[in-house]
Amino acid sequence: MPSSTELLALFDRVLREHARPDGPGVRVERAGPVVRQTGTADDWNGVVWSDPALDAPGAEAAVAAQVAHYTALGHDLFEWKLYGHDRPAALADRLREAGFVPEPSETVLVAPVERLSTAVAAPAGIEVREVRDAAGVRLMAAAHRAAFGEDPGRLLHRMLARLDEAPEEFVGVVALADGEPVSAARMELLPGTGFAGLWGGGTAPRWRGRGVYRALVAHRAAIAAARGYRYLQVDATADSAPILLRLGFTALTTTTPYVYRITP
């Protein structure tokens, strides 16, 4: 197995510097010292990679350029995904000075698929169902609302588009209790990279701590293994990171979403 340093370098190169669009109708492009994704206002828009050689003056110019780019398109929300090892060290300061607001940091975790257990059973009273159609995606959105209390509108848009345009790269799972969606998660498969990304994983409060999240991880790991993927990658919250570390994931770095919002 590669070392943590080697895995981080692979992660940076494959998933960030050479990132792929995460949905139809969006584009990923190199814009000077950064790689960014641009789509409609309902898509995820933001910077995913910056050149490690970026210096302080270059960082200030790059931040200003991205603000100009997205605001010219009329987007009122976009993001710069800042990683713990990104340079220069003052990049976070430049983002805050430009109006970006940091949200809670997450831990970037990676695990070899072959080392993960795929035999974790769902707890009693829970049915884990793989999502194959729009009705299933809407169940996932309902579970997201139950877990996080957030409007799932933009997420629903992105998942439906992904299912429609690239169903072979999208895996959704939903956990049901007496027919009600109480947890959901998805996996984004990246052909040719060896990586599959785990996203979501929110569980309604009354079902937390019972093993629902672990079951959804195992279910997706089994699918990734069957399709020949080598690694699973997760941006983990403080709640899910300890569970994933126990399951065999390794922490590589942190990522902090710096969000730029334009309020009317």
Image: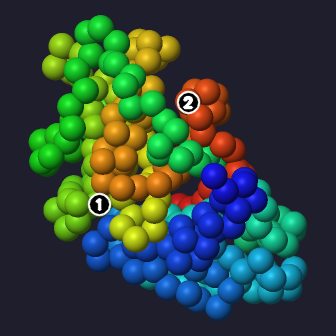
Where is mark 2, residue-wise?
247
Q: Is residue 35 above or below residue 151?
A: below
Please give the name of the residue rendered at 12% of the width and 42% of the height, measured from the top-left corner.
135
Please give the name of the residue rendered at 50% of the width and 52% of the height, measured from the top-left corner.
231
The tag on residue 257 is none
**Which of the 4 image quarters holds residue 164?**
bottom left
Q: Is residue 221 left or right of residue 16?
A: left
Instruction: Residue type at mark 1: give it.
Output: Glu
Residue 201 place in picture, x, y as percent: 43, 35
Tell me the element at label 2.
Answer: helix
Tell me the element at label 1.
Answer: helix
Where is mark 1, residue-wise?
169
> How are the residues colored?
rainbow
Q: Are marks 2 and 1 in contact (CB under 8 Å)?
A: no
Q: Is residue 209 left or right of residue 41?
A: right
Instruction: Residue type at mark 2: give it.
Output: Leu
Q: Nearer the viewer, residue 217 or 259?
A: 217
Q: Nearer the viewer, residue 61 or 136?
A: 136
The CA distance from mark 2 to mark 1 is 24 Å
Residue 147 place in picture, x, y as percent: 41, 28
Q: Nearer the viewer, mark 2 or mark 1?
A: 2
Q: Nearer the viewer, residue 17 or 74?
A: 17
Please give the name of the residue rendered at 26% of the width and 9% of the height, measured from the top-left corner.
125
Q: Is residue 263 left or right of residue 61?
A: left
Q: Is residue 250 above or below residue 97?
A: above
Res 251 seen here: yes
